[in-house]
Image (tube, rainbow, N blue to C red):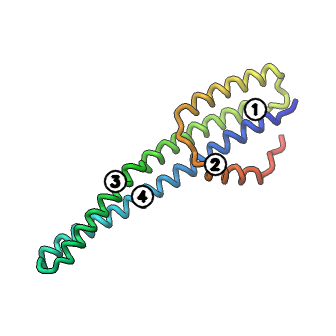
Amino acid sequence: MNTSLVYQWQKGVRIKHISHNRAASSFKTKYQRLGVVATVLSTLAASSIFASFADSEKIIWLITAGIISILTAVVNAINTFLSYGELAEKHRQAANGYGELRRYFETETLDAENLKVDELKDLLEVFSQKLSELEKSVPEIPQKLYNKVKKGLDKKKPKAS
């Protein structure tokens, strides 16, 4: 029996599984970096305010404190607007879902060459339903990341059955 369809479906789920894992990691890193910048800016703003009290005759300290406070608010607003932390969690959950689906499909198709056409058709139908259900709740994978993962997997040869 021709197992190219089974291989294509396995590969598609594998690409999405890996892509969501990488997206989760990427968004988590971005979230943490913005959080560190916001924390540093908040600390600098507080320090500048105290410095301006100590030497209130120098207007530069007041201006510096004001600018840093504004920058802190902007970084916090960007962090909130982009929702990197939330995106990281959604991609992590999606990766878990695709991983579970991938393991199910790989286990069920271990002996795909010996399955009857009707058995394979039933299996693909169940898999298609599970895949459709999962895809209703997952965030979009950045295209550049998806292409990179696909390209990496295209270089690898399929495992011999």
Tell me the mark number nearer the camera, choosing from 1 and 3.
Answer: 3
Q: Which residue position holds label 4?
A: 32
Circle 4: element type: helix
Q: Which residue position holds label 1?
A: 109
The kind of residue on which mark 3 rests is: Ala
Pick whichever of labels 4 and 3 is earlier in the sequence. 4
Q: Which residue position holds label 3?
A: 77
Q: In the picture, residue 52 is in which quadrant?
A: bottom left
Q: Nearer the viewer, residue 136 or 102?
A: 136
The kind of residue on which mark 2 rests is: Tyr
Residue 146 got which mark? 2
1 and 3 marks in contact (CB < 8 Å): no
Q: How many residues crowd around disc 2 within 10 Å: few (fewer than 14), some, or many (20 or more)? A: some
1 and 2 marks in contact (CB < 8 Å): no
Tell me the mark number nearer the camera, choosing from 4 and 2.
Answer: 2
Residue at left offset 66%, top offset 37%: 102
Q: CA distance from mark 3 to mark 2?
A: 28 Å
